[in-house]
Amino acid sequence: CVLEDYTWSDEDEIFLTKNKLASEIYEINNEGLKPINDFTTKFYSLGNNRLKDIFVFPDLDKIDSKEINSIKSTDEFFEVLKENNIIYIEGDANSGKTSLCKELYIKSFSHKKVPLYINIEDVGSKKYDRILKEVFLSQYGYEAADREKFDQLSKQEKIVIVDNFEKLQQDKVNDFCVNLESEFGTVIYVYKPIEKASILEDTKKNLATFNC
């Protein structure tokens, strides 16, 4: 017998099944950190559907290199992460970048990583420390003990996924990247190609860059 738990969605005006991934994540996360239900219910839902029911991993093609073949699955992606701690993923609008971010967030736990998801559209021009504080609270809750557990994790255990990276103000790009890369063992930047793409070029040199 499977018991379903439902929550009302004001946006969709229906009851949605609460995503069970939070409890599944908790079981495989050795640190006892798990995303809060309010976050997972919204994060994993796509309209009337759940991400895990409709997600199809896109082919990720390596840009300007023959060293890595196309990545065709989440497991292959995490294999690439073992050799590349900083990854750039670019893709046009509606190419599935945000859905990919969510899938990587979910699967990070099974690969013994504790993830944070940062959507630059949501954080605007805030300072780095405030961004990190707000996204942690929104994803893991307000328990001081949980933030302490997160801070005590080794760098290699933490992964951050930055969505809509191209929207970061140009004068903040360098400091933002330096701070992230000093705190997180794995950093994934996801962005849409733009005319002012030159702001990203210096940070992308000699790093693994894929097209979504």
Image (spheres, rainbow, N blue to C red):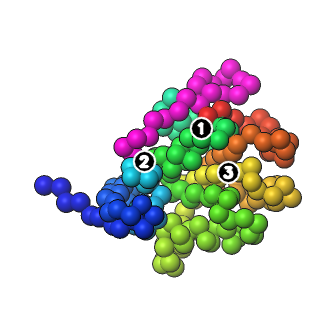
Q: How many marks?
A: 3
Q: Is residue 207 left or right of residue 104?
A: right
Give the spatial CA distance, label 1 vs label 2: 15 Å
Do residues under tags 1 and 2 come within 8 Å of each other at their CB atoms? Answer: no
Pick whichever of labels 3 and 1 is earlier in the sequence: 1
- Find residue 78 and report its horizontal and vertical position in percent: 52, 39
Under circle 2, the secondary element is helix
Which disc number belongs to residue 95?
Answer: 1
Which disc number belongs to residue 164?
Answer: 3
Q: Which residue is mark 2?
A: 51
Front-most of residues 187 and 98: 98
Name which residue lies at 65% across and 41% down: 93
Question: In the image, what residue type sits under mark 3?
Answer: Asn
Front-most of residues 119 and 115: 119
- Find residue 170 and report its horizontal and vertical position in percent: 84, 55
- Find residue 139 and report its horizontal and vertical position in percent: 51, 66
Q: Residue furthest left?
A: 1
Under circle 3, the secondary element is loop
